Image (cartoon, rainbow, N blue to C red):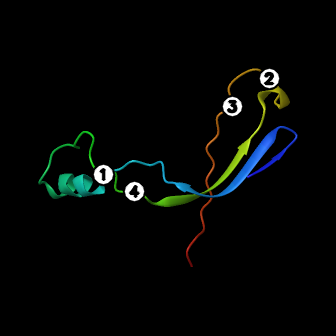
């Protein structure tokens, strides 16, 4: 983690925030279940994603609205 001029930067692994019950999904596809369980099983618990996080003070942005972004990169397998 680094900080400069009120901005914070981080690059590295973080816990995967995606919740998906893969086992139940396969059961639904296979016809042995008709719906997801609540809460279900978090198949991705304990796995990581590589993250780049940039925190910018709102005062440095023009305008007063909300700024939401979702960015991803992918590497094409050859």
Front residue (pair 28, 43) = 43
Q: CA distance from mark 1 to mark 3?
A: 31 Å
- Do the CB atoms of the residues marked 4 and 1 lie less than 8 Å apart? no
**Image disc number at residue 67:** 3
Mark 1, Cα crowd under 10 Å, few <14 / some 14-19 / many 20+, is some
Rendering quarter of residue 38:
top left
Mark 3 residue crowding within 10 angstroms, few (<14) / some (14–19) / many (20+): few
Q: Nearer the viewer, residue 22 or 42?
A: 42
The earlier-in-sequence mark between 1 and 3 is 1
**How many angstroms separate mark 2 from mark 4 (CA)?**
38 Å
Tag 4 secondary structure: loop
Task: Give the mark, 2 or 4, whose residue is nearer the N terminus.
Answer: 4
Against 59, residue 13 (above or below) is below
At 14% across and 49% down in the image, what residue appears?
Answer: 33
Residue lying at 73% horizontally and 52% vertically, measured from the top left: 1
Q: Position of residue 68 (x, y in %)?
A: 64, 34
Question: Which residue is denoted by mark 1 in the rendering?
Answer: 21
Residue extending furthest toward the right: 5
The circle drawn on residue 63 is 2
**CA distance separating discs 3 and 2:** 10 Å
**Above or below — where is 57 with respect to 33?**
above
**Neighbours of disc 2 within 10 Å: few (<14), some (14-19), many (20+):** few
Return the residue at label 4.
44
In the structure shown, which secondary structural element does the residue marked by tag 3 occupy? loop
Q: Nearer the viewer, mark 1 or mark 3?
A: 1
In which quadrant of the rendered view does residue 67 lie?
top right
Name the residue furthest left.
Answer: 32
Gap between marks 1 and 2, in whole Å?
40 Å
């Amino acid at each position: 983690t680094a900080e400069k001029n009120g901005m914070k930067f981080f690059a590295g692994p973080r816990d995967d925030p995606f919740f998906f019950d893969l086992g139940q999904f396969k059961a639904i596809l296979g016809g042995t279940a008709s719906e997801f369980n609540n809460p279900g099983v978090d198949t991705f618990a304990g796995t990581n994603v590589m993250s780049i996080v940039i925190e910018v003070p709102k005062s440095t942005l023009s305008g007063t609205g909300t700024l939401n972004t979702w960015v991803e990169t992918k590497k094409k397998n050859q």
